[in-house]
Amino acid sequence: MAPPVPPISWRPSQRAMRLLTAAVCALVPAIVFGAWWCVPLAAVPLLLLTAHGGSHPARIRAEADVPDRRCFEGETVTATIRLAADAAAGWTRQEYLPPRLRDFHEFDPTATPSGVRLESLELTGAVITVRLLVPRWGRWSLGAVAVDVYDTAGLRVAALQADLGEVEAFPVPAPDDTVLVPQRFPDRFGEHSARTPGEGVEFIAVRPYVFGDRQRRINWPATTRRRELQVNTFEAERAAEAVVVIDALSDLPQPPATEDLRPRSTLDIAVRGAAGLAQAYLKAHDRIGVVTLSGRVQWLTPGSGNAHLYRIAQTVMDLRKDFTYETGGLNRLPTRVLPRGALIYVFSPLLDPGVVEAIRDLADRGHPLVVIDVLAHEPHPTTAGKPDHLDMLALRLWRLDRQAVRFVLGELGVPVVNWDGVAPLDLALAPLLQMPVAGRAR
């Protein structure tokens, strides 16, 4: 059931105010100075105000339609507003007084100015077409369009607003085809070769025949040489499980890329990298989950399938609107969120001590870990001009603190790679492809 349409409040238009001003300017000299010949000059605007008031509708409806409520960052969203009234109005007569679009603004005061941008606003008959650019990922309010509706004489005007609702802009996944595998796989069939015998295609060795082995696996050349039945053994094919941890406690702006005009920050780089990893793992039919460390810890249990990629995107949508803070870290997560032996990626600028403690806790649990440092530049000195010795000393202390954090993670056996979000993620993860990522023995 549609909500009732509220009545429209009408007010004098600018044309009515100009006519009233002309009448007053004609009557004032007649009354003050006795110039009665000015009275006929005031009769014309007064006659237009009283005799030709025009009819106006009692109900006006503006229906906004946004076909695509989901898009990727950098795409354009088109909204259509259809105006309807129970009587003739100014916007139904284009040649008389067409409506004037007054304002376009964002309804949501928490949205950043880069949330949506107006590209074009066109009026065709009783249809308004709005084209909006969504340059950044997140859940954004499209705002509203305010319209002035006139009566048939153009002497009264009513303000009307059409709310366009919200849109969800998904992050563009970073280019990545690299899928790291842990040293120990869960007992689930997949496409990765494990180091244990089982059903697969990767040859390991030959062994003596045991009752129950398949005949098609008999190695006849080895059987002829050893004069007893020998069978081939293969590596088992298993599916990997991974969890992406996104550090949203620190969101620092990063220098823009030369070819990419999208806004960049440490959170943007982390989310785009997580989307790229999720896409790569799901393409390999593996399971992947996500955990966001922001004002509160949110998670998505590892899953597989194309629909799971959209669930991951939905999980990170609320990061830009999260202004609360709760204590507690990853130790409050359910066991199913971090399965045993799952490979964990941590996207973080490594600036918050709580995140470092969370990484230490994950390493103590025995999870194989990979930390991806998304901080692409060093802090700039606050003083204008050439930095002095105090600025250089502060920068040196900051570098030593970063080295200390990396040293602690290295002692825990956690590899740390740098990624600026510009180069493909494959290049940052390539050194880790030499051998499976192993966790600490518990």
Image (cartoon, rainbow, N blue to C red):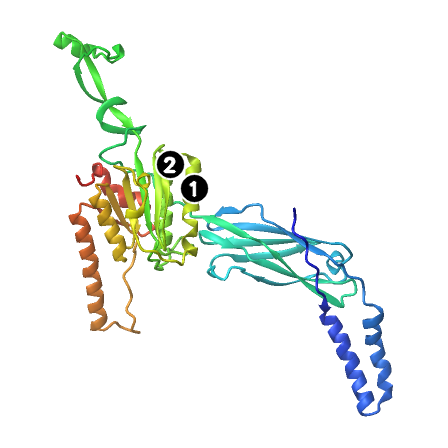
Residue 315 location (% of width, % of height): 41, 46
Q: Label 1 amino acid?
A: Arg
Q: CA distance from mark 2 to mark 1?
A: 10 Å
Viewer-proximal residue among 303 and 48: 303
Task: State whether residue 183 is above or below residue 399.
Answer: above
| Cβ atoms at labels 2 and 1 below 8 Å apart | yes
| Horizontal side, residue 111 vs residue 190: left or right | right
The residue at the point 83 percent across, 80 percent down is 42
Q: Residue beneath label 1, please? A: 311
Find numbered disc 2 in the image and state the secondary structure of the residue it sits on: strand
Location of residue 130 (image quadrant): bottom right
Residue 84 location (% of width, % of height): 71, 53
The residue at the point 53 percent across, 47 percent down is 69
Kindly give the residue lying farthest to the left in the view shown.
226
* Residue 277 visible to the viewer: no
Q: Which mark is residue 387?
A: none
Q: Label 2 amino acid?
A: Gly
Task: State whether residue 189 is above or below residue 86.
Answer: above
Viewer-proximal residue among 267 and 107: 107
Picture mark count: 2
The residue at the point 81 percent across, 84 percent down is 27
The residue at the point 30 percent across, 53 percent down is 328
* Residue 291 visible to the viewer: yes
| Horizontal side, residue 431 vs residue 318: left or right | left
Residue 266 location (% of width, % of height): 34, 55
Q: Which mark is residue 303?
A: 2
Binning the other alpha carbons within 10 Å of mark 1 as few (below 14), some (14 to 19) or many (20 upward) gives: some
| Horizontal side, residue 47 vs residue 242: left or right | right
Kindly give the residue lying farthest to the bottom in the view shown.
33
Residue 45 location (% of width, % of height): 81, 75
Name the quarter where the C terminus is drawn: top left
